[in-house]
Amino acid sequence: MPRKEYGTRPNGIFAGRVTANRENSRELNSYLDSLSAKVFQAKKALLKADKEVTADAIKNLLLGKEGDKRMILKFFKEHNGQIAALVGADFAPGRF
C-alpha cells in the first residue's frame, strides 16, 4: 500500500502549511491557524502580565498549567501554621 505524503511548497517552506487541496489538508491548515492564534494570544497574555515569554510558559498557559507550583509539603506547613494559630482559641493543645 503506497504511503500518503503531504508536501509544502517547492522550496520546502511556506509558513508550515500543507499545499494539497484536499479536505483533510484544509482541515489541517485550519487547525494550524487556530493553534497559531492561541499561541499568539498566550504570548500577548504573558507580555501583559509582565511575565517571561518562553516556549514552556506558552505551553503551560495553553495546557492550563499556569499558576503557583506549590508542593504538598508547603501546603501542610501552611495548614499547620494556621492550626497552630488557633490553639487556645478554637483548638485544645492536645488536638494539634
Image (cartoon, helix red, strand yellow):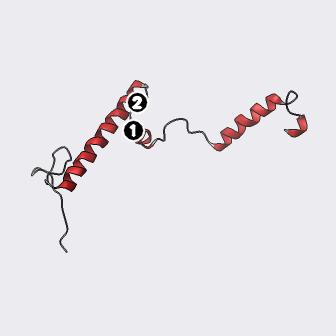
Q: Which residue is mark 1?
A: 58
Q: Are marks 1 and 2 in contact (CB under 8 Å)?
A: yes
**Horizontal placement of 68 versus 4: left or right?**
right
**Horizontal placement of 67 versus 37: left or right?**
right
- Amino acid type of the residue tagged 1 in the rendering: Ile
Q: Residue furthest front?
A: 23
Residue 94, given in percent of the width and then of the height, sits at 90, 39
Q: Earlier in the sequence, mark 1 or mark 2?
A: 2
In this rendering, the answer to whether 38 lies above or below 20 is above
Quadrant of res 84 = top right
- What numbered label is drawn on residue 46? 2
Secondary structure under badge 1? helix
**Horizontal placement of 45 versus 78: left or right?**
left
In this rendering, the answer to whether 38 lies above or below 3 is above
Residue 22, given in percent of the width and then of the height, sits at 16, 55
Quadrant of res 48 = top left
